[in-house]
Structure formats: C-alpha cells, structure tokens
Amino acid sequence: MAEIITDEAVPFTFSGGQKVNLIPISLMLLEQFDKSHIPPDPPKRKITVAGDVEEEIYDPDDEGYQRVLEIHNAKATHDFMELICNFGMELELPDDDKWMRQLTAAGIEFDKDLPESAYVQYKCMRMFQDDLKRMTEVILRISGVGEEAIQSWVEMF
C-alpha cells in the first residue's frame, strides 16, 4: 500500500443527489481489517495419485466449506461497509429527525446519544450498490491504496 494521497475531503454525490465528503482511511486500519478478515482454509481430502500413493489436497468445492465461506464473505462485506461509512465519510446531520423515525420503524436499534454514528449507519443502508462501489474506490484511492487492491475490495460488493 502507498501513502495517503490527500488529507483533504473529497466531495461525493450519490445517485439520488445526496452529497457527502469522503476522507482518507488510515492504511494501518485497512491492513488491520485485512488481517482480521482472512477467509478460512478449505478442508483437505485424500486422493490417490499413483497406485497406492495418497496425497492430501485442498477441496474448495466442498459444500460445507462453501457455506462457511459464504457466511465469512457476507460478514466481511458488512464489516467493510461499516468501516468505509464510519471512517471514510463526513456527514452533516439533517435538521429534522425523519431519518431516526425511519430507522426505528425498520426495527434498527441505534444509540440516540451518538446521532452522528446512527446517521452514518442510516446513509449506508440507503446506498445503492453502485454508489457504494464508487465511494469505496474514491476513499481507497485517496487513502493511497494500489489499483489491484482497490479492485479486490470493490469486488466484495
């Protein structure tokens, strides 16, 4: 990973017209995220390679492993979205509390003593997938992440 490209907030407009400022995320935080979301290894199985010679190989097609991997990937995607939203966006709270009523109506619990964090959660839930991909690319790019790594992260969505 490279160094942060800018410390300045970068304006971003969602497809619905809402505007936010995107800010770089610490490379150390992104690296820590990677370390804490390593996918599980697939199980091994024995195969016969020549006569009586057996060899252990990884079996990524194992159905149980596929389910475990799917759960892991869903959690990693959710956690990454929260990371991007909580550390990569600057938001101004709206003057009304309509968004709080919408969260409450949807049965989503949030800390009313931390409205900024709850509002970030609200904005992220209302994003379109394409917005999330574009926003992720911008945040990672201004954070100094290389192009190959950016594409890997964006593919999560």
Image (tube, rainbow, N blue to C red):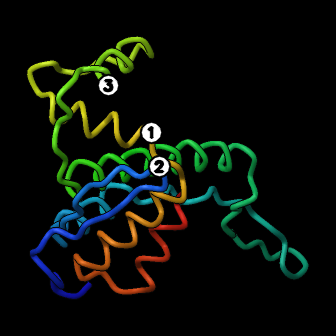
Residue with the mark numbered 2: 16
| Residue 95, above or below 9 | above
Q: Mark 2 or mark 3: name the one nearer the start of the chain.
A: 2
Percent of width and height locating residue 156 = 52, 60
**Mark 2 or 3: the one toward you:** 2
Residue at left offset 23%, top offset 30%: 118
* Left/right of residue 87 with respect to residue 68 in the rendered view: left
Query: 134 or 78: which is nearer to us?
Result: 134
Which x, y percent locates residue 61?
75, 58
Q: Which mark is residue 126?
A: 1
- Asked if residue 44 lies left or right of residue 53, the reply is left
From this view, report whether residue 13 is shown above or below residue 91: below
Query: Do the residues under discs 2 and 1 have CB atoms within 8 angstroms?
Result: yes
The residue tagged with tag 3: helix, strand or loop?
A: helix
Q: Quadrant of the N terminus?
A: bottom left
Which quarter shows the C terminus? bottom right
Q: Do the residues labelled 1 and 3 touch (CB within 8 Å)?
A: no
Where does the image place residue 150, in percent across and percent down from the top left? 41, 76
Task: Please name the residue shown 86% across and 74% down the image.
Answer: 52
